[in-house]
Amino acid sequence: MYQNSSQQYPPQHPQQYQPGQMAAPGIVMGTPVPEAGDIGKMPVSQVPPEVRNGFVRKVYSLLSVQLMVTFGIALYMNTQLTPLWVAKHLGIYYMASFGTLAMMLGVSCCCADALRNFPFNYAFLAALTIGMSITVGFATVLYTTDSVLLALGTTAGVFLVLTAYACLTTTDFTGIGPYLFAGLIALMMFGFVISIFSWLTGTPMVGSMVHKLYAGCGVLLFVFYIIYDTQLIVGGEHKKQQFAVDDYVFATIELYLDVINLFVFLLELMGDRR
């Protein structure tokens, strides 16, 4: 059980919405015209430049704080804790992991509108960040510090390049959400099958070609997720789907989970275990 606690780290991502859906929180189509004066419900491409720029700054400011906290905690745990300590305290890992998943599912199903209201949205972001930080921290303890730093630097470089590409390209990626979601489901099933096989046979899959293939598929999937979510955030006149101005917390969560999952899969793909 201990050996599979981090390498089969389940990719988590908010539900993806299909083109044409108006009831889904977080994303609205660019064509409907909201009521006059209700600028918070307008797609980012239909608001004045200063409002759009403020939305983008808010998203990336919150994202920066989340990532600094997460990677700070992860690096601290990697340098101060040992795999033996992790093996003895797996209960903390499971509490953080399943607690975070339960929070996201609960908010998505029951009170998504609350994420548009202060201070609940900031409290939720804080709780999500702490939970994910502990989960990622446990995963990093199983790898060498050099591997963690390499994965962190690679993640930062890939994220910056993908962000620039998503903003500058004329290709619209906002219509591929359903395909990405299907890929996410397939990846989760792949990881589940690997875990079951490892448990039934007693053979660790860490470092095997199958596990490397799983991690490589995860990296590829979240590369496209970063492009997709970035275009939803920055908007544009010809984008099929965009976030609304009030949905900056939804946007922050989407991009945060993209980056975290990219980091974890890169660590699994390139990292050396202790």
Image (spheres, grey):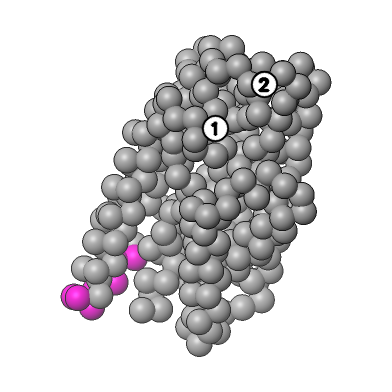
Residue 16: give x, y in percent of width and height.
Answer: 44, 39
Q: Residue at x 50, y 64 (%)?
A: 102
* Label 2 element class: loop
* Disc 1 residue type (three-letter): Ile
**Residue bearing the label numbered 1:** 27
Q: Position of residue 198 (x, y in %)?
A: 25, 71
Quarter-wise, where is residue 38 in the image? Answer: top right
* Residue 19 visible in image: yes
Q: Quadrant of residue 124?
A: bottom right
In the picture, measured across the screen, residue 76 lies left or right of residue 193, that is right
The amino acid on which the numbered mark 2 sits, given as a three-letter code, is Glu
Name the residue rendered at 44%, 67% in the picture. 6
For the N terminus, the quadrant is: bottom left
Q: Residue furthest left?
A: 201
Q: Say if 35 sits above or below 2 in the image.
A: above
In the image, which residues are magenta?
200-206
Mark 1–mark 2 Cα distance, whole angstroms, equals 17 Å
Q: Nearer the viewer, residue 25 or 136?
A: 25
**What residue occupies the far right of the structure in this picture?**
50
For mark 2, what is the residue? 35
The residue under the point 46% across, 23% down is 173
